[in-house]
Amino acid sequence: MTDKVDAEQFNDDELEAPAWLNPQFIEEILIAYEDAPELKVVDLKITPASAQGDHYASVMFRTTAECTTAKGKFSRPLIIKTMPEQEGHKKDMLSESHLFETEIGMYCQVLPEFERILRESGDDTKLFVPCIYHSLEPRKVMIFEDLVPQGYYVIRDRPVAQEELKTAFAKLAKWHAISMKFIKEQPDFLKEFKYGLFEMPTVKNDPFITTGMQSFIEMLDRLPELRKYKPHFEQIKDKYMQQVQAVMQEYRENRRSDAFYVLCHGDFHLRNMMFKNNKETGAHEDAMLVDFQISNLCPITIDLTYSIYMLMEAEQRREMGKDLINHYLTVLVATLKSIGYKGELPTQAKLWEQIHRNKYYDFFLLSTFLPLILAIKSNSFKMNDLIQDPETRQKTYFLDTYVKDVSTLLPKFEQLGYFKCL
C-alpha cells in the first residue's frame, strides 16, 4: 500500500501507486532476481521517490519489500520508474516518446559495456546503479536498486559545492571518452541512440518551449538596464529554434570534421545526480548520474552548455563554467589516453571554439530553461504549473535571481561576440 505523505512535497501523480504496483508484481520480479522460487513478499511499503521539481518525464515510487525465503527474512529497497497514467499534459507530452527504450538500452547494454572498458584500463569508477527489471509491455517500467540506503542523497536545500560538481563532471568525462572510442571504432553499437529532446514528437510544439523567447524579450523590454539587448533577440526569435535543432542533430544530419561528438547524457542537471559522503569522515566521496532517458549522439557541447545553465551555481555561470569544463577536459583526455583512443584529442582551444560556435543553444537555455530551474530552486513554484501555466512561467522571468543572472550573462555574450552576424 502507499504510505501517507505530505502531498505538497511531491508530484500529484506520485501520491497514489497504480493498482498493478502490488506485492504480487514485486514478488514475481524478486523471485527471478534473487533466484529464489520460494520467496514471498509479506509487506510492501510505497512512497513517492522524488520531490516536486526533481523530474517531469516519468512517474517514480520508492518501495521497500519485506521478504521471506528459506534463508530467512530481508528487506529489498527499490525504485520503480514508469510512464504517467493520469490523463493530462504530462501523459500527452510523453506518450509517443522513446524515453524508456533509450533508458533501457543505456542501463542494460551501453553503461555495462562502458564500465567494462574502464575496468580493462584499471579504472573502477561506477557509472550506474543496477536495473533489476525492465519491460515495455504491457506497460513501460524500470526497477532499480535504491541508492538512498547506500548513503546517496539528492541536493535540494543548498548550493552544490565545487568538489561535488567536479566529481559529477569527472563521471561525465569518462563516459563521454568511452563513447568517443565507440563512435570511432564501433559506431553501430550506439546508432540507436538518436532521440534527443527535439525528437520527442510533442516537445518542439509545446508552449513551454515555443513561448520562452518571447517571454524573455518582454522581460528585456520591461527592464531599462537590459532593454538595449532586445534588438538582438528580436532579430533571431523566428529562426533560433531551427538553429538549436540543427546543433542538437548535427551528428546525424550534418557532421563536421572540426567538431567532437559523444553519447551525451541529455539532461545533465543537479536533480539527475546523487551524491555520497564517507561514513567515517563525512568527506565527499562519490556522485552517481541517473536518468538517461534522452541520451543521444550529439556534439560534445550539448551536455557542457546545458550544465552551465541547469547544473552550475550563479558564480560558476558568470565565467561560463570555465574551471569546471576545463576540469572535465582534463579527465576526458586522460581517459581517452588510458582506454587507447586513436583519434584526435580535444584541446581547450578547440573545445571552447565549439562551445562558442553553438551560441544559439545558449540563447535557448538562457531564455527558456534557466528561469525554470531557478524557479524550482526557489521552492516557490510547482513543476506542473511552471510547465503548463503561462502566467506562472511569466513570473519566473522577473525573479531576482534570474534577472541578476541575465544581467551578468548578456554582457558576457557581447564580449564573446555572440551578437555579431546573427
Image (cartoon, grey):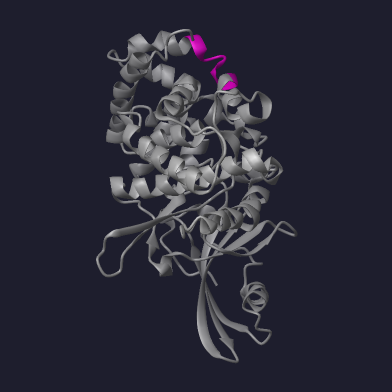
Residue placed furthest toward the right: 138
- Judge left or right: residue 208 versus residue 417: right
List x then y, in percent, for residue 26: 62, 73
Q: Indicate whether 45 appears above or below 231.
A: below
Q: Tell me, yes or no, if residue 122 can be seen here.
A: yes
Residue range highlighted in magenta: 235-242
Q: Give the quarter of the figure containing the N terminus.
A: bottom right
- Judge left or right: residue 293 versus residue 159: right
Magenta span dominant secondary structure:
helix
Q: Nearer the viewer, residue 125 or 391?
A: 125
Report the residue at 38% width, 32% height from top. Answer: 396
Q: Indicate whether 358 appears above or below 290.
A: above
Q: Nearer the viewer, residue 131 or 183?
A: 183
Res 256 → quadrant: top right
List x then y, in percent, for residue 37: 69, 84
Q: Nearer the viewer, residue 344 or 417?
A: 344
Q: Indicate whether 265 appears above or below 418.
A: below
Report the residue at 41% width, 61% height from top. Answer: 6
Q: Tell me, yes or no, if residue 294 can be seen here.
A: no
Q: How many marks?
A: 0
Report the residue at 41% width, 25% height from top. Answer: 349
Res 414 → quadrant: top left
Q: Nearer the viewer, residue 71 or 327?
A: 327
List x then y, in percent, for residue 87: 64, 48
List x then y, in percent, for residue 149: 42, 70
Report the residue at 33% width, 15% height from top. Answer: 415
- Judge left or right: residue 245 versus residue 331: right
